[in-house]
Image: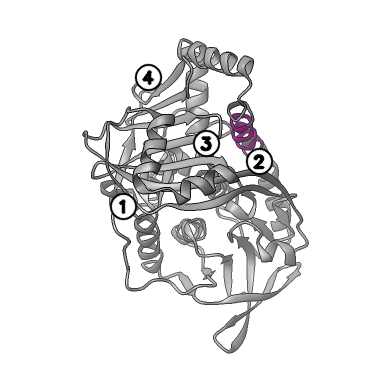
Amino acid sequence: MDCEICIVGGGLVGLAAALAFGTQGRSVQLFEARPYDTQNNQPSALDVRSIALSYSTTQIFQSLGIWDELKPNCAAINQIHVSSAGHFGVTRLNASELNLPSMGQVIEYHVLAQQLLVAVQKQQNIEICSPARVTEIIQHDDGVAIAYQSGQTEHRIKAGVLVVAEGAGSSIGEMLGITTQTVDYEQTAIVANVKIQQPESGCAYERFTAQGPMAMLPLPQQRYAMVWTNTHERAGQLMEMSEKGFIENIYKQFGLRLGYFEQLGRRDQFALKMRRADKLVSGRCVLIGNAANALHPVAGQGFNLGMRDIAQLYDDLCAVDLSEHSTPELLERYQQQRIQDHEQTVALGNGLVQLFSNNLPVINYLRAAGLAMMDLCPTLKNQMGWQGMGYGASASSLMRGVAVAQSQDEGNLTV
């Protein structure tokens, strides 16, 4: 066997998986189709893309020993403010009410990617092959034979387990005969950063409008990352507007909770579809992250769900000889353990989209009243908060923030 674990897909989830299994002492080979940016080219401050890290994800990074490097580049989410445009009623989720330092963090995508890549490169038992493309997969009783092309040369290796961490519509999933179900939300998300005048408050906003939800996430240096969901037609109109006109439309839907904006970064857009694999496991191969579930961004759970996949797989494969014939049964148990979290997360996102993308007058008043009632019900708020932070179904050892060098009895988070 050439390596214990082969990972296909070297994005955020693939790099995090490689780091997790490398830290576990596994021999890992990571394939990425595109070359990595070795020059570490950085976009301008207002053109960066960002990603929200749930509290459970920050705990996983703590366990993997890289949180100290990531934290200075993050903006903490201390409160989440949920409201519906044009109607009374809000819900506020506060980290202090849950006795936590924060409910999550927001970090620039390229910073997280670079820090993960550096951490992976430091692991001597992880080999990165980039650019490389997997061309064939043959499963055997004691391993997976993988053919891949790097440059003009084709190579073959054998691994105990193949982890598929490609994006949505994974070609490897198709090779394995795993079908996917697609839901077209018939919406487009516009993403952009804004520079604000007032000091950062650590508050993230989820604002539901008649066209679709708008999220505002805090970033360092008095910036906010906006994800604004609209119909395709409306998104096209907004993309064509001048900077002034676009900002004025933000004010109309969001108000002046963040004051007036000083600057607006580059606007990008992408169509929203949910893609879910019909199963997570095929023999010795397992799908994680977007290869398993590509979700609507409304609840900010896509990347975090992938990190929880890694954490569960980390526990399930711990101290296991992956050449044993029982490995496929272990992966089947992993699949059963992940079903509840996947179903809860998908239901949360779809429920929010359906409930808050409806402009019927009666529904408007009912959901506004629901937000107000939830704000007055600590038990319900706390349940929603814990689920949003990734603890709705289970808590693996990595999610409890157990550092690799520590014993499992030290520093555990009780949830």
Q: Quadrant of the N terminus?
A: bottom right
| C-alpha separation, residue under disc 3 versus residue under disc 4 | 20 Å
Question: Which circle, 2 or 3, is nearer the viewer?
Answer: 3
Name the residue at 47% across, 73% down: 127
The image quarter in which residue 259 lies: top left
Precedes in sequence: disc 2 or disc 3: 3
Residue 334 to residue 392: above or below: below
* Amino acid type, label 3: Ala
Q: Badge 2 local density, few (<14 within 10 Å), some, or many (20+)?
A: some
Measured as percent of width and height from the top left, residue 289 is found at 58, 52
Question: Which marked residue is nearer to the observer: mark 3 or mark 4?
Answer: 3
Give the x, y percent position of residue 56.
45, 39
The tag on residue 46 is 1
Q: Quadrant of residue 101?
A: top left
Q: Nearer the viewer, mark 1 or mark 2?
A: 1
Provide the residue span drawn in magenta: 342-353
Using the numbered discs, state the Cα–Cα distance from disc 2 to disc 4 in whole angstroms.
29 Å
Q: Which mark is residue 337?
A: 2
Residues tagged 1 and 2 counted as in contact (Cβ below 8 A):
no
Q: Which mark is residue 97?
A: 4
From the viewer's perspective, is the residue at label 4 or at label 1 nearer? 1
User: Secondary structure beneath disc 4?
Assistant: helix
Disc 2 element:
helix
Q: Which residue is mark 3?
A: 299
The answer to whether 114 appears left or right of 1 in the picture is left
Amino acid identity at mark 4: Glu
Residue 50: within the magenta? no
Query: How many numbered circles does the render carry?
Result: 4
